[in-house]
Each structure stands twice: as structure tokens, then as C-alpha cells.
Image (tube, helix red, strand yellow):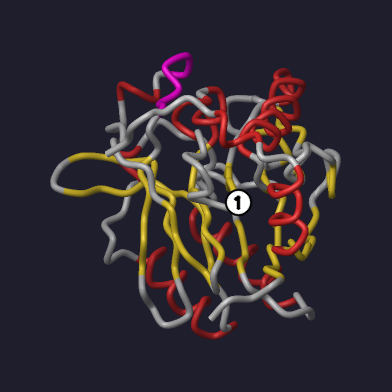
Amino acid sequence: MRSEQLKFTVIQSDIVWEDKGANLMQFEDIISSIESTKNIVVLPEMFTTGFSMAPSRLAEPMEGKTIKWMIATATKHRCILTGSLMIEENGHYFNRLVWVQPDGQIIHYDKRHLFCFAGEDKHYEAGHKRKIVSVNGWRINLQVCYDLRFPVWARNQGEEYDVLLYVANWPAQRSLAWRTLLQARAIENMCYVVGVNRVGKDGKNHVYAGESSVFGPLGEILWQHGNTAVCHTIALDKTTLLKTRADFPFLADRDAFLFT
């Protein structure tokens, strides 16, 4: 079934350092307070712990407490719930974006580009496959934080997706790059871009400025928030996207890249 509009609820929040129980309680309260219709609720990167390099202590299996909470929450609120967390699988650790549908179906994407500057590559395994999910006739490309810096990985091959979704723990000192690259990805891929970041300070004293943003297919700012916590719902319009692509068929001149 195709829907002309798709609603994203962006939750930009502080994250309690390495305290899964406190974070799940916080997000449960926020989600329960949303009065508008919920299609897709988006949490930040590593929403249960913050950007921690301690997966051996904090990672969970796909059958763990957090996934069970995500399933129960998505089912209760009849929405898709997504965000990334530490996952342990077959003795390996992943920064995994988990996409939970209200029927309990789970899809996931493992972060491809690990942030070596912070040693993420020493603790986690990189993913190797892009993941594009479908919702009511919309196609959404799932990405995590540092993936934003690598345009080939996000490249829209024709019109294979409509929305690029990034969840992040992007530090304030590089906020200019965050805003600029989100806008660039929208322009070059002729798509909507939804970027969800956190605020506050983590256990390593890194400060996060939020600036969660939604851009349209010509790079226009549809919504952007500063450095305070916020829960905001925005409806994206398919007719506007298709008209923009028809009026400006720039994707027809793209270079060809192949992905597995």
C-alpha cells in the first residue's frame, strides 16, 4: 500500500552514560507522551549507552532486553521503532541499527564506516551490506553516523530509495560537517534526508550539539533543532519528491557504482 505521506518522529535527547535501564525508561516516557500519529520513531546512535567502546561489557544479543523492549514498544504504539545499539553475535560486536516493525519483524543494518579516530574499529566489526527498507511504498536507506562522510556508500542508484536516514552521536566541535554533509547527501541523491543526533555530554566529556535535521530533495531545510532535547514529528510528502525528480532529472546523469 502506497502512502503519499510518511511521518518521522525524531527524538533528540541526552543519553545517560552506559546506563541501559535509565535510557530505556527515558525513551519509554518520551514515546508514550507522543500524541500525534506515529509512523517511524527514530532514536539516536547507541541510544542505550552513548558512544561507548565497552561492548564486551555492555553488548546484548538480538534476543536481549533492549530488542525485547523495542518489539514491545513498537507493538504497543503501532509504529516502527529504530535506533542503533551494541549487539553481540557469534563472538563479534556490531554497532547495529535495528529497525523494528509493529508486527515484530526485525531488520538491521551494521554500521559500515567505523570511527577509527575514536577506536571504534578496535571494538566492533564493520558491516558490508547496505540496507534499504520499504514502508507503504517508501524506500529508506539506513545509515549510522560516520557513514555520512562517505558519499559513494550512500549513492542513490537511480531512484532506489526516497529517504536517507542517519542516526548519530556527532560531537559539537564538528557540527558544521554534520549540517553540511546532511544537506549535501540530500542534494546529490535527490532524496529526503533525516539526521537524528543526541545532545548533552557523554562519559568521556564529549559534548553533543544535537542539530537533528530534515532536508528536502533540493537541499532545503524542512526542520532543524539546536542543542536542547526535543521530540518532533514531520510528515514527508511523496508527491513533492516525485515532482522534484521529474522537474530536475539529475540522477539520470549519475556515475554507476555497484553494491552487494
Q: Residue at x 50, y 45 (%)?
A: 46
Magenta stretch in the rendered image: 113-118
* Residue 231 shown left or right of residue 91 in the figure: right
Q: Secondary structure at mark 1?
A: strand
Q: Which residue is mark 1?
A: 163
Give the percent coordinates (x, y) of residue 213. 76, 43
Quadrant housing the C terminus: top left
- On screen, residue 87 above or below 153: below
- The amino acid beneath tag 1 is Val
Q: Residue at x 75, y 55 (%)?
A: 243
Q: Nearer the viewer, residue 119 or 41?
A: 41
Residue at the farthest top position: 117
- On screen, residue 17 above or below 122: below
Q: Is residue 178 magenta?
A: no
- On screen, residue 117 above or below 238: above
* Residue 55 shown left or right of residue 89 in the figure: right
Q: Nearer the viewer, residue 195 or 242?
A: 242
Give the percent coordinates (x, y) of residue 150. 50, 23
Quarter of the image for residue 226 reads top right
